[in-house]
């Protein structure tokens, strides 16, 4: 029943996030969280921020945090925006940069929030088909578009474009903003951040949720020309001046200052990913080359649904989509080495390999 709902909301099909189980204990390989805890320095800063200061509103401009991010990525603080997770920043960017009259483009197989935002904000999109090997069809995204949205590495394939390819895309859309969603870039892809100095139409979005093990804190950031950053501030200030709370700002700042811990956990995830990919290939799986903290895999002769259900019965959650192009593929988050051992044992039982 949708009585009292506005017309617009009645017609919305919202994004469905991966399951967060409450009832039984699963090995959770379905939402690309980090298997390791956040930086101890971040946790200490979070505890310190959870005190008397919470009486006061946070700094709406998050100046200290933006300075830290600016130093870390060698940009200036007026080229940095922070928000309540990168999903929120993406939502702001769709409103800030796109108009219904000019069609935006993104790959057919990509982050499922993009079509939801397109509908929610009354925009029009063209979804371009993937190359046969599931790579992003760069040429099809070049041209006179109303905007481009690219996840690099892409989700859920895990495949990445080179920096040259991203630059070609940005260069070939001079009249439109190109959003590069780098949620997974720290797991081995090239970041487009150095390009923001040369291209006033490029916005790069990153998050603390994956490579910095802070999905529960809800904080992300965007980097781009200060003109683009000001448009994001304008959208935010029409909606909620305080999207990043004191605890989140302190936690991300400390996490960014703990470079050693960051390097160590992303290294462990990448090593486990490459080892798991080899073992899955040995079992007979087709595994796309991943630059992310997950693997996108299929098994000849078994449906994706059967594999997903079989894993669930064995206490392992993975993600799958109904789009026929990828319905037989599973997206498996890279967990700890022990979790990967359990996964591989389960898959070898299910496939009889
Ligand atoms: C996880 C993810 C995000 C969302 O990250 P939050 O910062 O947790 O909102 C954005 N884009 C892609 C492609 C993701 O996979």
Image: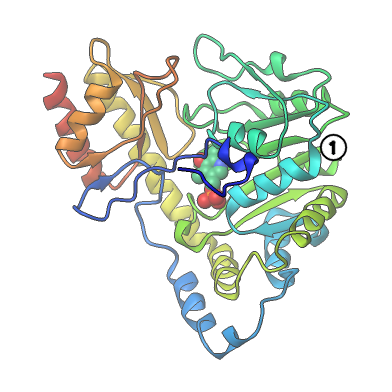
| Viewer-proximal residue among 286 and 144 | 144
| Quadrant including the C terminus | top left
Residue appearing at x 72%, y 59% in the figure:
239
Q: Is mark 1 on a helix, strand or loop?
A: loop
| 200 relative position to 54: left or right | right
Residue appearing at x 72%, y 26% in the figure:
124
Using a 10 Å C-alpha cutoff, classify the residue at mark 1 as few (fewer than 14 neighbours), some (14 to 19) or many (20 or more): some
Q: Quadrant of residue 101?
A: top right
| Quadrant including the N terminus | top left
Assign ligand 1 to one image quadrant: top right
Residue appearing at x 45%, y 65% in the figure:
39
Q: Name the residue under label 1.
A: 199
| 55 relative position to 286: left or right | right
| 311 relative position to 322: left or right | left
Residue 186 visible here: no
x then y, percent, for residue 171 = 82, 26
């Amino acid at each position: 029943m949708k009585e009292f709902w506005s017309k617009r909301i009645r017609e919305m099909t919202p994004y469905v996030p991966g399951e967060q189980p409450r009832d039984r204990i699963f090995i959770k390989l379905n939402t690309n969280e980090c298997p390791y805890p956040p930086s101890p320095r971040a946790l200490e800063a979070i505890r310190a921020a959870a005190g008397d200061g919470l009486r006061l509103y946070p700094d709406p401009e998050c100046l200290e945090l933006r300075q830290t991010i600016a130093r870390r990525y060698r940009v200036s603080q007026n080229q940095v925006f922070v928000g309540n997770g990168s999903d929120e920043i993406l939502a702001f960017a769709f409103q800030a940069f796109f108009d219904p009259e000019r069609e935006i483009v993104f790959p057919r197989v990509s982050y499922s929030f993009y079509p939801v935002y397109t509908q929610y904000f009354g925009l029009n999109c063209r979804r371009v088909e993937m190359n046969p090997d599931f790579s992003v069809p760069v040429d099809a995204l070049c041209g006179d578009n109303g905007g481009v949205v690219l996840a690099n590495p892409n989700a859920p394939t895990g495949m990445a474009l080179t920096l040259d390819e991203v630059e070609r895309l940005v260069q070939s859309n001079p009249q439109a903003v190109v959003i590069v969603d780098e949620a997974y870039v720290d797991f081995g892809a090239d970041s487009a951040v150095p390009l923001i100095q040369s291209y006033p139409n490029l916005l790069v979005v990153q998050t603390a949720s994956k490579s910095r093990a802070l999905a529960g804190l809800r904080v992300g950031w965007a980097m781009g020309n200060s003109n683009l950053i000001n448009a994001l501030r304008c959208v935010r200030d029409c909606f909620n001046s305080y999207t990043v709370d004191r605890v989140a700002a302190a936690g991300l700042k400390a996490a960014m200052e703990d470079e050693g811990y960051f390097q160590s956990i992303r290294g462990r995830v990448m090593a486990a990913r490459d080892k798991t990919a080899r073992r899955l290939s040995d079992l007979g799986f087709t595994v796309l080359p991943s630059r992310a903290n997950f693997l996108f895999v299929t098994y000849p002769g078994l449906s994706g649904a059967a594999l997903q259900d079989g894993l669930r019965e064995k206490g392992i959650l993975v993600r799958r989509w109904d789009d026929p192009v990828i319905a037989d593929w599973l997206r498996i988050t890279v967990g700890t080495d022990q979790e990967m051992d359990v996964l591989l044992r389960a898959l070898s039982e299910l496939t009889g390999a």
